[in-house]
Image: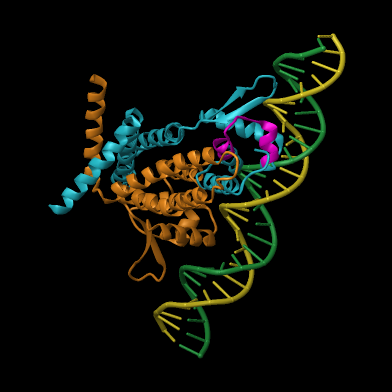
Chain colours: A orange, B cyan, C yellow, D green
Amino acid sequence: MAELTGVQKQYILHWGEMGTRWGINRTVAQIHALLYLSPKALPAEEIAETLSVARSNVSTSIRELETWGIVRAVHVLGDRREHYESMKDVWEMFRLVIEQRKRREIDPTREMLRRCLADVDPKEAGADYTRERLGAMAGFFEAVTELHDQMKQLPTGTVRKLLRMGTKMRKKARRD
Amino acid sequence: MAELTGVQKQYILHWGEMGTRWGINRTVAQIHALLYLSPKALPAEEIAETLSVARSNVSTSIRELETWGIVRAVHVLGDRREHYESMKDVWEMFRLVIEQRKRREIDPTREMLRRCLADVDPKEAGADYTRERLGAMAGFFEAVTELHDQMKQLPTGTVRKLLRMGTKMRKKARRD
DNA sequence: CTGTATATTCAGTTTGTACTGAAAGGACAG
DNA sequence: CTGTCCTTTCAGTACAAACTGAATATACAG
């Protein structure tokens, strides 16, 4: 893995770009991309060299990937260094990330909306309007939460079944 | 709307924070929050004052919201200024944003993956492994695209029906 | 036309996040 | 223990994105 192939380079750079667009640090995303493509676990130093970033930067980035649960340290016989490897199951990887982003971002937003709804001062002008808007937004987030809870518990295969079912319902609706 | 109520402040600040976490400019998100809560369309200057940002900043931010299609300019009789209002249908708003983020981010990633798969050099060591990993990732993105296409064409009510159906299937699966 | 009100553009500045390298902190072989 | 190898922490720096305000463009009333 010392030298990257053209394809690897392309994938890693793109993945880094995607990361930034979704609020994920570029280097963190690049390291993940590198590990995902790597057939064997890599030591931090090799990651740093391959991506041309500081060793310490790799350390913190790896830590973040570990908190997501999509990268873990493994030990190689006869080597004192930690080697890092990425989870390879793509669906599971995204499930983990989505679950955590929901916890970190969706859930607090739901709470904020509830708090706001409770705090609307009825004496304030336009209180009804504010409640209406906040309520609509809250409803949406509740639905998203419901959807997520479903997905979380469905095995991958069932998601695919639902996809097919959706197709049928859509076709039927069009005929009606 | 000159002075914000406590609830409005809370909502706008939180929404700005959420924006940044998803790669959306804080001010852009705040302006959207303000317009979403506002019962009437607001002129740029009032937005700037209310949020304490430069008039020019509002101009560019509004432009971005317009490209998303979730804010539009309206005219008020006897006023030369443009007034801006947010779409109020939350589901439609998110549908628009998701559709465009898919176009800007998911689609290019799919293309990148296809290109990579085509470019894998069979002579290179580990070519099979690389293809396997790229293929798995590509499969995921294809599924996401499929899911999106379904959602896009389903009326909101049908999404809810699917949610309920999922619940039943899950309960059944648990019994089995 | 001219003058005024409004909107946009853009060069320069600010700000916050990411990154580096040096120092400190572990772990372990000998 | 001691020295070596590796990891983590952190203060300072670099950099990119966001923001400002002045200059410019545009629209329109008179």
Residue B168: horizontal and vertical position, in percent? Answer: 20, 45
Position of B76 relative to B65 (above/below): above
Q: Residue at x 41, y 57 (%)?
A: A68
| Near-viewer residue (B23 or A58) | B23
- Res. B146 in view: no
> Residue at horizontal 37%, vertical 61%?
A72
**Residue closer to the observer: B163 or A70:** B163
Horizontally, residue A16 falls left or right of residue B38, namely left
Residue C7 picture location, percent across and down: 68, 25
Q: Quadrant of the N terminus of chain B?
A: top right
Front-lying residue, B104 or B124 = B104
Q: Is residue B131 left or right of residue B81?
A: left
**Left or right placement of residue B122 versus residue A53 in this view:** left
User: Residue sitting at 50 percent across and 61 percent down?
Assistant: A60
Q: Is residue A104 above or below residue A8?
A: below
Percent x, y of residue B46: 68, 35
How many labels sit on residues? 0
Q: Residue furthest front?
A: A123
Seen from this angle, which residue lies furthest left?
B176
Span colored in magenta: B33-50
Main secondary-structure element of the magenta-colored stretch? helix
Q: At 23% across and 41% down in the image, what residue appears?
A: B165
Q: Is residue B59 above or below residue A47?
A: above
Q: Position of residue B162 (x, y in %)?
A: 27, 38
| Residue B128 falls inside the magenta stretch | no
Q: Is residue B149 visible?
A: yes
Q: Is residue B45 magenta?
A: yes
